[in-house]
Image: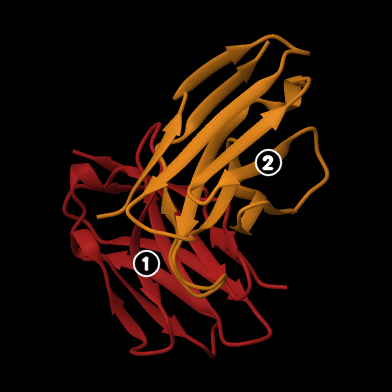
Chain colours: A orange, B red
């Protein structure tokens, strides 16, 4: 069966420090991968998606970047965190073409920037 | 572009009462529609999805939703609320990307 792992689960970082959140999927190959950010009362905002290794699309301009160094690995990064980067970050994958299949979510990473 | 609007950020019901969570969508083409549930500090879990087959969709945990094209709605219902249903619920529409509503927090009173 397929599983998705996301870490760390909780992170407290000072403003200006770097960030690396990692997500890996097991039990499937060539998944579509996504990073969402969830802010209180705002639902989920799509940050990045990837349909293959090295293929990253960004939905909104921001202080974050994403990379996909391996087929089932998706990394969210920042060189210098801002207070506004605080939130709950969710990695997700889908097996079908974009827009047609359900998303499978990781457990999330809660980032607090102080 | 597709979008969804969830009516009511908070809904409170008594245990055993009907649960009704409202969702209206906007899409220029026939959409796929989803309901997800999120428990505190966890990821989202799929409750049910509509993919242009039957308009009444049954999901897990006794939930169901009805697709009404004339009303552009996809409301989520459950006949009898249980304490374990307390969570946040997200409606989503998907054409090229999954777009989520702002969420509705369901509280179940004993």
- How far apart are the alpha carbons under marks 2 and 1? 34 Å
Q: Say above or below: A84 vs B36.
A: above
Describe the element under mark 1 as helix, strand or loop. strand
Q: Position of residue B39 (x, y in %)?
A: 35, 40
Q: Label 2 belongs to which residue?
A: A66
Q: Say above or below: A87 vs B109.
A: above
> Is B15 on the left-hand or right-hand side of A17?
left
User: Which residue shows up at 38% across the image and 72% down it?
Assistant: B49
The answer to which of B41 and A50 lies nearer the viewer is: A50
> Is A40 on the left-hand or right-hand side of A62?
left
Location of the N terminus of chain A by quadrant is bottom left
Describe the element under mark 2 as helix, strand or loop. strand
Q: Position of residue A57 (x, y in %)?
A: 73, 55
Q: Please give the chain letter of the residue carrying mark 1.
A: B
Question: Can you tell which quarter of the image residue B70 is in?
Answer: bottom right
The answer to which of A83 and A35 lies nearer the viewer is: A35
Disc tally is 2
User: Which residue shows up at 37% across the image and 58% down it?
Assistant: A28
Q: Residues within 10 Å of mark 2 (few under 14, many from 20)?
A: many
Same chain shared by disc 2 and disc 1? no
Is residue B78 visible in this depiction of the protein? yes
Tell which tag, 2 or 1, sits nearer the viewer: 2
Q: Please give the chain letter of the residue carrying mark 2.
A: A
User: Which residue shows up at 63% across the image and 35% down it?
Assistant: A76
The answer to which of B25 and A3 lies nearer the viewer is: A3
The answer to which of A93 and A43 lies nearer the viewer is: A93
Question: Can you tell which quarter of the image residue B5 is in?
Answer: bottom right
Q: Position of residue A85 (x, y in %)?
A: 70, 27
Is residue A43 visible in this depiction of the protein? no
Q: Label 1 belongs to which residue?
A: B76
The numbered mark at residue B23 is: none
User: Which residue shows up at 69% across the image and 9% down it?
Assistant: A14
């Amino acid at each position: 069966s397929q599983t998705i792992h996301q870490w760390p689960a909780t992170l407290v970082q000072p403003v200006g420090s770097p960030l690396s959140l990692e997500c890996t999927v097991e039990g499937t190959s060539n998944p579509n991968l996504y990073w969402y950010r969830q802010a209180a009362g705002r639902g989920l905002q799509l940050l990045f998606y990837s349909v293959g290794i090295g293929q990253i699309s960004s939905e909104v301009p921001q202080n974050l970047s994403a990379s996909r160094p391996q087929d089932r690995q998706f990394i969210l990064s920042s060189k210098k965190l801002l207070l506004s980067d605080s939130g709950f970050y969710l990695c997700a994958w889908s097996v079908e073409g974009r827009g047609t299949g359900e998303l499978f979510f990781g457990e999330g990473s809660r980032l607090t920037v102080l | 572009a597709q979008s969804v609007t969830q009516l009511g950020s908070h809904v409170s019901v008594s245990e055993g009462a009907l649960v009704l969570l409202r969702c209206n969508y906007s899409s220029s083409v026939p959409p796929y529609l989803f309901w997800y549930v999120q428990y505190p500090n966890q990821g989202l879990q799929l409750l049910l999805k509509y993919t242009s087959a039957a308009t009444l969709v049954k999901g897990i945990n006794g939930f169901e939703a009805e697709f009404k094209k004339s009303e552009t709605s996809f409301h989520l219902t459950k006949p009898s609320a249980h304490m374990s249903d307390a969570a946040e619920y997200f409606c989503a529409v998907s054409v090229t990307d999954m777009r989520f509503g702002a969420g509705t927090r369901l509280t179940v009173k004993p």
